[in-house]
């Protein structure tokens, strides 16, 4: 039997999608775009991907599979579209991935011929920067040169497991004796596949917030990072898994949880926190799990032990490994030049009231972060119209996406506090480790939206408005996701090519 209501919703969404794509392309169109075959191909490819994804959702009604498809289809474009080393710090992530590919999980900072660095290979030591595939044929077509070569930076402070997927891609390129560009493409693809897989698992696992998680997971900035060598691919997608497991505990049946679930959640948060220390703040969310969900209600209080365990593990990791490793890179000379010193910054904050005033002005960072939502690549322009429209869309989604149950006040407060701790903590860490001593503006901390992108999934638990008259239109939300992706990637194709 044909579901005519479902069919009509699909037709309406398809019409909205096609009209929006036409309007977007009219807005960004100019003569140079018309002459660019790559731009035209991008418009065609993204349109086909959008139509395919809409049709797939109409047929399956499965949000996690649809998100997996969207991530792969649009991510594949980014694998090839993104210029070499154009995503923030991609060259350094590339080098760490290559070092990981030959089993060196803890890179050694060495001195050779009066130069300091890490041992990688010649192919990576002579990589181009911010160049497209068409501009780097002399590097692309060369066979992989595995001659040992010293490189000055390799993200020593990051745990090795955030680079395993990229390393597998590099190993495959070496095994098949392909050319140098194949290391880039295969490493990016394996990282994208990891992101899509973890995201699929998280959306499937979570009992609530499936659509908000899908929206955040398919945000253009997230997909571009996932389709690069960046460790953010692991950080974002594993954050979704942590949130999904937490929400599974939150919605569990009464008397079904034990200390085992708290232990699993603690381990998940530690794994995540070692890759991005401020995301250890997710540990606080254990407090939203209702006491009655535990077989022994007193087990809930082990949540406090969980929080302390995470905090202790991250302090030990940071103090005895990560912080000292940061200077083993190009950052050491930059920090000396900028007068960046964590101890000096702490002394400044303790002795000068202006330091406190600087952090009281954190709300001034909201327009700064909104303006950076479409900053997909370090040295290319952003898309101001996208920033405004997407922000409005996401605020409306968080407010009016209907959850099954009314969110209790305590849940809202604890979630809001956890989100605040992660965002505020990100600024504090960056201010101490990146901003010059005595900086009067938080913009000098170098904070960008991707640092706390995963916490956006939790916003509906804070500001959600329940109204039985409002119905969730999932296919319309997916349509919006696809419109934003098509528009953003088409814009970038026109800017770059």
Image (cartoon, helix red, strand yellow):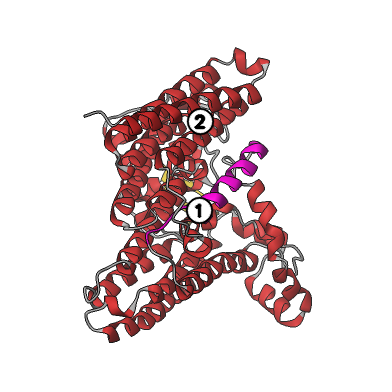
State the quadrant of the N terminus.
top left
The tally of labels here is 2
Kindly identify the residue that appears in the image at 32 percent across and 80 percent down. Answer: 291
Residue 293 spot, x, y in % from top left? 28, 75
Question: CB of mark 2 within 8 Å of CB of mark 1?
Answer: no
Q: Is residue 400 magenta?
A: yes
Name of the residue lying farthest toward the bottom: 298
Instruction: Inspect this view and state whether residue 127 appears.
Output: no
Q: Is residue 86 left or right of residue 461?
A: right
Instruction: Give percent across and percent down for residue 176.
Output: 27, 30
115 over 54 or under it: above or below: below
- Locate the C terminus by quadrant: top right
Q: Main secondary structure of the magenta part?
A: helix
Q: Which residue is mark 2?
A: 486
Residue 361 image point, x, y percent: 73, 66
Q: Is residue 452 positioned above or below 261 on the image?
A: above
Q: Secondary structure at mark 2?
A: helix
Instruction: Name the residue at 63% across, 71% down.
Output: 342
Residue lying furthest front = 469
First in sequence: mark 2 vs mark 1: 1
Residue at the image position 47 percent from the left and 57 percent from the top: 467
Rendering quarter of residue 52: top left
- Badge 1 is on which residue? 400
What are the residue bounds of the magenta stretch? 380-404
């Amino acid at each position: 039997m044909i579901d005519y209501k479902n069919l009509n919703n699909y037709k309406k969404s398809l019409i909205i999608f096609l009209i929006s794509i036409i309007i977007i392309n009219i807005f960004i169109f100019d003569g140079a775009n018309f002459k660019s075959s790559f731009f035209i191909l991008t418009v065609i490819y993204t349109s086909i991907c959008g139509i395919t994804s809409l049709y797939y959702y109409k047929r399956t009604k499965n949000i996690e599979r649809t998100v997996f498809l969207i991530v792969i289809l649009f991510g594949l474009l980014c694998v090839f579209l993104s210029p070499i080393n154009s995503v923030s710090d991609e060259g350094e992530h590339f080098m760490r991935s290559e070092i990981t590919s030959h089993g060196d999980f803890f890179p050694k900072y060495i001195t050779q011929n009066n130069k300091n660095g890490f041992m990688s290979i010649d192919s990576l030591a002579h990589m181009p920067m911010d160049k497209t595939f068409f501009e780097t044929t002399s590097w692309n077509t060369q066979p992989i040169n595995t001659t040992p070569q010293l490189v000055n930076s390799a993200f020593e402070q990051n745990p090795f497991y955030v680079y395993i997927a990229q390393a597998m891609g590099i190993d495959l390129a070496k095994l098949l004796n392909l050319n140098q560009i194949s290391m880039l493409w295969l490493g990016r693809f394996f990282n994208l596949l990891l992101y899509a897989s973890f995201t699929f698992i998280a959306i499937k696992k979570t009992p609530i917030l499936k659509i908000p998680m899908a929206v955040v997971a398919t945000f253009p900035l997230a997909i571009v990072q996932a389709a690069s060598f960046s460790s953010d691919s692991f950080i974002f997608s594993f954050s979704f898994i942590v949130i999904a497991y937490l929400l599974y505990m939150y919605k569990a049946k009464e008397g079904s949880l034990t200390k085992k679930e708290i232990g699993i959640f603690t381990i998940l948060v530690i794994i995540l926190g070692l890759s991005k220390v401020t995301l250890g703040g997710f540990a606080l969310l254990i407090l939203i799990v209702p006491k009655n969900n535990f077989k022994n209600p007193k087990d809930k209080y082990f949540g406090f032990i969980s929080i302390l365990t995470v905090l202790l593990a991250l302090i030990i990791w940071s103090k005895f490994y990560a912080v000292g490793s940061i200077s083993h890179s190009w950052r050491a000379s930059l920090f000396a030049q900028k007068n960046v010193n964590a101890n000096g910054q702490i002394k400044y904050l303790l002795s000068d009231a202006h330091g406190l005033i600087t952090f009281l002005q954190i709300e001034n960072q909201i327009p700064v972060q909104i303006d950076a939502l479409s900053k997909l690549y370090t040295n290319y322009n952003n898309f101001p119209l996208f920033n405004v429209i997407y922000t409005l869309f996401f605020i409306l989604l968080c407010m009016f996406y209907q959850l099954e149950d009314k969110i209790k006040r305590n849940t809202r407060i604890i979630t809001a506090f956890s989100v605040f701790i992660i965002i505020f903590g990100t600024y504090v860490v960056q201010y101490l480790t990146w901003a010059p001593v005595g900086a009067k503006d938080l913009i000098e901390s170098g904070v960008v939206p991707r640092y706390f992108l995963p916490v956006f999934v939790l916003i509906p638990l804070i500001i959600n408005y329940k109204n039985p008259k409002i119905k969730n239109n999932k296919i319309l939300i997916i349509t919006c996701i696809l419109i934003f992706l098509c528009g953003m990637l088409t814009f970038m194709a026109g800017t770059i090519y």
